[in-house]
Amino acid sequence: MGCGAALAQHDDSAALAQAGKLATQCEKQMAALQQAATPGDAARYLAALAKLEAQLKERGELQKVLALRDELERAKNSAHPLQTPAMLPEARKVQESLVAETRAAQQSAAQKIIAAAGEAIKQLATLRKDVNARQHERLKQLAGGISAHAALKWAHELVPELALPKLADPPPDKPFTLKAGKGEPYTFYPPGKEPPQKGSRSIKLEIAFADLRGALANYNLAAGEAGGLPRISITAKNNDLPEGTRLVIEYFGRYPNHRGFRRESCEHIRLPAIARGSGLVVDGHGMREYSSKYVGVKSYAPIYGIIISLFDAQDKIILQGCTPSALMQECRRELPPLL
């Protein structure tokens, strides 16, 4: 017993030491990338002006050489000489070229910084399995240090379209209920802890679209009054799925004495954050009622098929699948309206 506890503590210490080393290396890498992309303007500009002066002398343009010497004197006494346009056109071209080079280098460095931070935080997330629950807070602090680093803030100002990485909360270990859409709340289950579905059968989805974020969806259908109740399993494969990701379920029904199928209803379910490698299970609410002149009472259309989609908070599609394959023609990459 004591030996086992000591071993567990040793494993925790090793994992936390690895996490600390990982965070330190990431912060040093981000700082180095920022520093390399922000060289001193004055030294670069003076070197470029000296080269331009030699070219003007070689061409015998003495008036321009004299004008350039005034610009050289100004640049020597300025910490940021590129911020004030030069009077001589040739010197202004040198300024514009250096500014463009700096901007390109900084954009590239910013993307690398955000990518490095994201990869480090993903690795911190994978270390959760090697530490006990009390140590999760330490991993969160290390990830927070990366997210708050000055180099990462600098990078995000340059490329604000790239989301800042953060450590997602660990997946819950018990079911929880959220008001995640219209109507009744939804209950979310950790994989393997969902209640049994009577008459449930697994149905393969035909994939219509999947981006590099690599989410996965599995679909089970339980027979029921509401034309069939879907159970959807979502897994974040390559990246975290942040809070605000929407699971969209489009139901297609068949009616008595009616050929073909039509979109019967559509529900949007706002998902909680799902960390990479984790998953959640949620049951859809099923199809809505319809009044049938053939039956004379309110009833439910037999479910013909379903389209399951994931959209991010900016309404960009992440994943889309359908069953049967005849519904492939109904798949769209735009967020469908509630129905």
Image: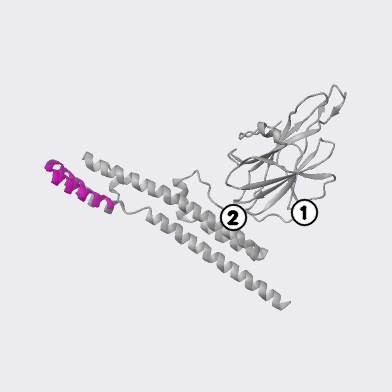
Whether residue 77 can be seen here: no
State left or right for residue 241 relative to residue 23: right
Q: Is residue 145 magenta?
A: no
Front residue (pair 74, 121)? 121
Look at the numbered disc 2 and give the secondary structure of its residue.
Answer: loop
Front residue (pair 311, 152)? 311
Query: Where residue 221 sits: x, y (%)?
Result: 78, 42
Quadrant hosting residue 93: top left
Report, in whole angstroms, how far the alpha carbon at label 2 lies from the one at label 1.
24 Å
**First along the sequence among labels 2 and 1:** 2
Look at the numbered disc 1 and give the secondary structure of its residue.
Answer: loop
The colouring scheme, among rainbow, by chain, secondary structure or one colour, is one colour
> Which residue lies at the image location 30% right of the left edge and 42% below the top edge?
96
Q: Magenta region, mostly helix, strand or loop?
A: helix
Amino acid type, callout 1: Lys
Amino acid type, callout 2: Leu
Write down the residue under mark 2.
Answer: 167
Residue 37 drawn above or below residue 185: below
Write down the residue under mark 1.
Answer: 193
Whether residue 157 can be seen here: yes
Residue 182 drawn above or below residue 28: above
Quadrant hosting residue 264: top right
Q: Report the span colored magenta.
A: 44-73
Query: Where residue 169 sits: x, y (%)?
Result: 64, 54
> Which residue lies at the image location 50% right of the left edge and 43% below the top edge?
161
> Which residue lies at the image location 48% right of the left edge and 44% below the top edge?
160
Front residue (pair 80, 302)? 302
Q: Is residue 70 magenta?
A: yes
State left or right for residue 108 relative to residue 189: left
Query: Where residue 22 sits: x, y (%)?
Result: 52, 63
The single residue placed furthest to the top in the displayed view is 293
Query: Where residue 203 sits: x, y (%)?
Result: 75, 43
